[in-house]
Image (cartoon, coloured by chain):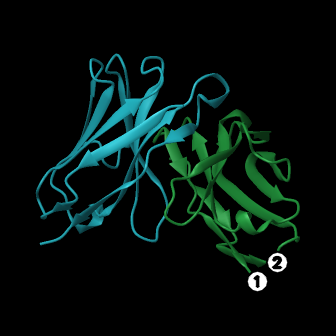
Chain colours: A green, B cyan
Amino acid sequence: EIVLTQSPGTLSLSPGERATLSCRASQSVSGSYLGWYQQKPGQAPRLLIYGASSRATGIPDRFTGSGSGTDFTLTISRLEPEDFAVYYCQQYGSSPLITFGQGTRLEIK
Amino acid sequence: QVQLQPWGAGLLKPSETLSLTCAVYGGSFSGYYWSWIRQPPGKGLEWIGEINHSGSTNSNPSLKSRVTILVDTSKNQFSLRLTSVTAADTAVYYCARRGYHYYYYYIDVWGKGTTVTVSS
């Protein structure tokens, strides 16, 4: 089983700042199979990034995904008030077929 | 615009069977895998399993012995049964769609979560 470990657990930043979220896999993950989701309180998650670096439909370009192998990063260039949420990385392909990281909470400082 | 609407019993006693159904509205049913994902209170996401229109399933080995996922293509619905529930199965349960083409490896449509509580 591939375990995804996200860091930090909580990130406290101010609007306008840059956020860098990490997702580390216990084994190599094909970049095609790594995605990122955003979840706001009381809502279902929303797909942000697929294929490690491609933005899903309607996702603003301040969201950037990067990385390969075991280390992946989600960068939010200039935080907007609506970006404060919990972010999850997800991999596909290793049993179980789909696994998520434990999440990073991005909170307003 | 595809919409997923889940329903089912929200309060169970330990050892009972969780049963949820999800109806798919407004889009194609075939050609996709339909998933169940859960989220315990204050915790992260756990993929439970999925099924396609042909009835082909994949499930999380950690739950496989207790999980049954079924499909009813005549109604564009799929369902989850989880036997012998305990308090650890208390969670928000999401029905969702694994995508197509670029989104094949990801969950691109999510239903509203439905809360299931297991308590004696």
**Mark 1–mark 2 contact, CB under 8 Å?**
yes
Q: Is residue A77 visible?
A: yes
Left/right placement of residue B59 relative to residue A38 reads: left
What amino acid is labelled 2 in the image? Answer: Ser
* Cα separation between marks 1 and 2: 5 Å
Where does label 1 land, which residue? A109
Q: Tag 2, which chain? A: A
Element under disc 2: loop
Q: Tag 1, which chain? A: A
Q: Nearer the viewer, residue A8 or A54?
A: A54
Residue B46: give x, y in percent of width and height. 44, 53
| Residue drawn at x 48%, y 56% as measured from the top left | B45
Q: Nearer the viewer, residue A99 or B104?
A: B104
| Residue drawn at x 54%, y 66% as measured from the top left | A41
Where does label 2 land, which residue? A14
A24 w.r.t. A85: above or below:
above
Residue A104: give x, y in percent of width and height. 64, 67
Image quarter hosting the C terminus of chain A: bottom right
